[in-house]
Amino acid sequence: MSRKIAIIGGGWYGCHIASSLMALGFSVRLFEQNDRLLHEASGNNQFRLHLGFHYPRHATTRIQSRDGFSRFLERYGDLSRPIEENIYAVPRRTSLLDFDTYKLIMTATGISYKTVDQCGADLREIEGMILAEERVILIEKARHYFSAHLRQALSLSVRIESVEQTDRHVLVNGERFDYMVDATWGHFTPVPIQTFFEPTLLLYFEAAPNLPAVTFVDGPLYSIYPTEEPRVYTLSSVPHTPLGRYSSSAEACAARDSVNSDLIRSKLELMVNQACENVTYFHDQYRFLGPQIAIKTKPIGGSDDRSCYVGRQGRIFSVMSGKIDTIFFATERILSMMEADSDGPSQDIPSSLLANIRAKTVQIGMDIGG
Ligand SMILES: Cc1cc2nc3c(=O)[nH]c(=O)nc-3n(C[C@H](O)[C@H](O)[C@H](O)COP(=O)(O)OP(=O)(O)OC[C@H]3O[C@@H](n4cnc5c(N)ncnc54)[C@H](O)[C@@H]3O)c2cc1C
């Protein structure tokens, strides 16, 4: 009999996990509190399909991204597009690491890049730069895809308020399921590592199409990245994008909802000034369009860990998503834990290796003795 799974949260994680479990024959219901999918962090981010270049301080993150990138292309290739010129640059004074160290880390991770002297962006105060493959995630297309693909499994505009476990089931808003997957990025039940909630502000700008994507690494720096709209870019800043640090989802949501135009104007000035430090034409070529506000769930610690973790309590799995590329990792962890349940407890099976060796020696007429 097919197992019945409740998935809470219609972001990238909930949608991908639902789609994968349905393909394997599970009976799936996906609950999302908003009236559309990919409405929260999954629809409000920098839309970068990472390959690992962003994370010189965290090996697992790079490795998960490197592998997740190619799996994303296999499964959802149409939901992303390539970027003509994608630059990672190490600034001279403000980076936490030097350019050679940066390149050594990326080479050791097995992700390929090309060192370049020049790029389409007129950059200054740069120690070195590389040209790297990465892609833009097409969020509207993804929303359409999952809305159609998951249609029969969707319960939109339903907020899950209560969960109760029995020996063999889990009751989700009173309805019985075999398992529940919490894919709310820690907003409903806790994730398996220590985290905090960070409301965030990215800025949308309009500029000529096909300007290079530029990311400055590593430390309190910033990046300019294209979106699915050919003339629209996001500006994200490590020091200025965060809008606070909160231990509960409710506090973070209240802070997000209180963002006003004064705050946005002051952040706009700070972020544009920062961008002008290295991108000489930023002020003249980019026109501010509007803000993007979201909430990030971040691990506590300075290593920039953006890898994915899956925890389990009885019949409830909780997913601490990494970036969008780690959706595959999450699904496989959940499946392997469910599979372990159906195998039952592992038994001690006596070894017959010595008997097999003896049988073979007798068969071929060798007398080893002993
Ligand atoms: C500013 C910013 C920039 C980022 N840039 C990138 C990037 O360029 N590339 C990248 O790969 N990643 C990026 N990320 C990270 C990426 O956005 C997240 O890793 C990813 O979107 C998390 O997906 P999710 O499905 O876990 O969470 P979400 O997208 O937040 O989905 C969780 C869903 O759960 C729903 N929910 C919550 N509680 C309940 C409830 N009780 N009942 C029902 N539904 C509920 C919410 O409404 C929401 O839709 C960025 C994030 C931020 C904030």
Image (cartoon, helix red, strand yellow):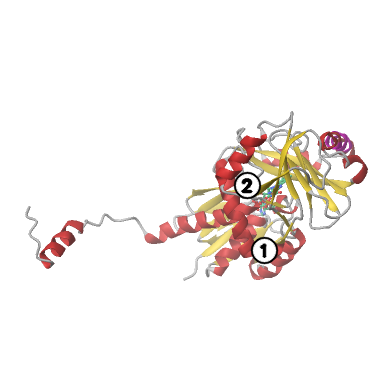
Marks 1/2: CA–CA distance? 18 Å
Q: Is residue 148 visible?
A: yes
In the displayed structure, would residue 269 be above or below residue 203?
A: above
State which quadrant residue 329 falls in. bottom right
- The residue segment tinted magenta is 265-272
Q: Which mark is residue 77?
A: 1
In the displayed structure, would residue 350 be above or below residue 280?
A: below
Q: Nearer the viewer, residue 276 or 104?
A: 104
| Residue 355 falls left or right of residue 306 | left
Task: Give residue 256's position: percent from left, percent from top.
Answer: 77, 41
Q: Which mark is residue 52?
A: 2
- Most extreme residue toward the top is 93
Task: Give residue 73's position: percent from left, percent from top.
Answer: 64, 61
- Most extreme residue toward the right is 284
Badge 2 amino acid: Gly
Q: Which mark is residue 192?
A: none
Question: Which callout, 1 or 2, points at the residue further toward the start of the chain?
Answer: 2
| Residue 220 falls left or right of residue 209 | left
In the rendered image, residue 267 lying in the magenta stretch gets the answer yes
Q: Are marks 1 and 2 in contact (CB under 8 Å)?
A: no
Task: Give residue 146's position: percent from left, percent from top.
Answer: 68, 65
